[in-house]
Amino acid sequence: MFEWIASPEAWIALATLTALEIVLGIDNIIFISILVGRLPEKQRAFARNLGLTLAMVARLALLFSIAWVMGLTEPMFTLFAEEISGRDMILVLGGLFLLAKSTHEIHNSLEGVEGKQGGVATATLGSVLVQIALLDIVFSLDSVITAVGLVDHISIMAIAIIVAVGVMLLAAASINDFVERHPTIKMLALAFLILVGVTLVAEGLDFHVPKGYIYFAMAFSVAVEMLNIRVRDRRVRAVKLHKAYRSTD
């Protein structure tokens, strides 16, 4: 099972797959961070960690059911001259759910800012975990199929998944705090989730969307927004310094 340990190529594949799993897991972290933000504060850390653990369990379960997963790529029926597989159905339904949920969260964020009479409604721990579990299945399916296409050893895939989720567990709290401190980042993250939802639906309908373009667009948008945040922070500091200087006169 671990005969690949002496192979440098296998270690390169492990490093590559781990990095890819972390990149693919960013979607999960963002989605989970936004969902747990609607929970009471004392439940957020528990829900976030449990959600990422569920993601790892889902990926490992699908990985060790690899024959069934790959069988999902076989056509089940034909619709409008297009062959539809189990994977296509899961991707389309997951994409539609992500689109609906992201749009709903954007609406709630705007309403929460504009009308604070009742605030934004909180969610229950059970409902949040159910939503996380549903999206974990979609993201995990895509992740496992990608992993199978890169390496041949299930042990390499399992290690990459465990390491990637460990990194996400360490980074999740910081990412969550950063998103909560910067509403524009939260809105940008929700826009990313809409983009991911559209991509999932497109792939489910057999329209190939190069993920490199998607992630480049996301990275570029984040870089621009980080510059905007830095400029705003400098302006705020300048205003504070100016007020402090005038108060001493």
Image (cartoon, rainbow, N blue to C red):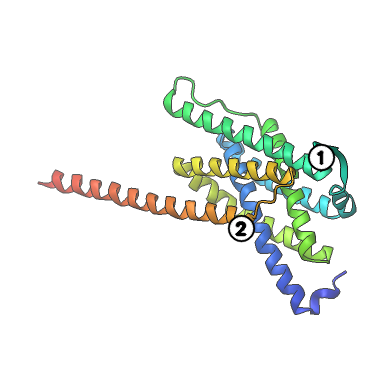
Query: What amino acid is labelled 2 in the image?
Result: Gly
Residue farthest along the front direction in this orientation: 81
Quadrant of the rendered image containing residue 75 = top right
Labelled pair 2, 1 in contact (Cβ < 8 Å): no
| Residue matched to label 1 | 81
| Residue matched to label 2 | 212
Residue farthest along the left direction in this orientation: 249
Task: Tell me: 25 left or right of 93.
Answer: left
| Nearer to the camera, 51 or 59 | 59
Within 10 angstroms of label 2, few (less than 14), some, or many (20 or more) residues?
A: few
Task: Tell me: 24 left or right of 56.
Answer: left
Q: Mark yes or no: residue 226 visible.
A: yes
Q: Mark yes or no: residue 158 visible.
A: no
* Residue drawn where x is 50% and y is 31% of the image: 109
Question: Which quarter of the figure is the N terminus placed in?
Answer: bottom right
* Residue drawn where x is 62% and y is 33% of the image: 101
Given this view, does label 2 or label 1 mark the residue nearer the observer? 1
- Label placed on residue 43: none
